[in-house]
Image (tube, grey):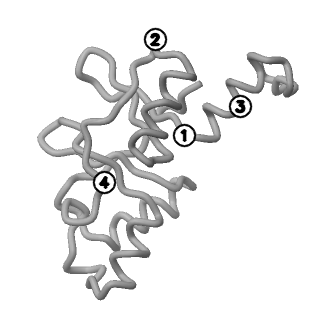
Amino acid sequence: MMQSPVLAIGVRASLRQAAIALRDGHVGVLVVMDDGDATGVLSERDIVRAIAGGADPDAADVGSVRSEGPRYATPSDSPAAALSVMLDAGIRHLPVIEEDELVGIVSMRDVARALAYAVGDAPRPADG
């Protein structure tokens, strides 16, 4: 159910650098890394809120704007377990960690699709 590889960005990168990474990667969220550890996520919405609040996109860093962890899933978590974490935390993206390594990310859309497949209400994509 997870998407991999996941795009990540350093905690000290600027908001502009993050926006460029989001655009170029065609994604809506980046995992924020600090010394090899996933410390949170940064979404398009986080950047918009920060800039609308007066943040300078070249001076503000992603560490000051990110949604902080440690909320994550593991590859063996069920879609229902991932959904529970997302709903409890009010988030739409969840990093997937295995043996202290970032291996993917799961979105609310991924979870909804997996749950729909499980109950037979959605066709599987052609590539499986």
Q: CA distance from mark 2 to mark 3?
A: 17 Å
What is the x, y in percent for residue 8?
34, 46
Residue at 59%, 24% (x, y): give it. Answer: 1
The amino acid sitting under disc 4 is Ser
Counting residues from the N terminus, which is met first, the one under dot 4 or under dot 3?
4
Counting residues from the N terminus, which is met first, the one under dot 1 or under dot 2?
2
> Quick one: label 2, few (<14), some, or many (20+) residues within 10 Å?
few
Q: CA distance from mark 1 to mark 2?
A: 16 Å
Residue at 45%, 52% (x, y): give it. Answer: 29
Q: Are marks 2 and 3 in contact (CB under 8 Å)?
A: no
The answer to whether 121 is drawn above or below residue 5 in the figure is above
The answer to whether 122 is drawn above or below residue 37 in the figure is above
Q: Secondary structure at mark 3?
A: helix
What is the x, y in percent for residue 72?
35, 31
Q: CA distance from mark 2 to mark 4?
A: 24 Å
Label annotation for residue 76: 2
Judging by the rendered image, the residue that carries numbered circle 1 is 107
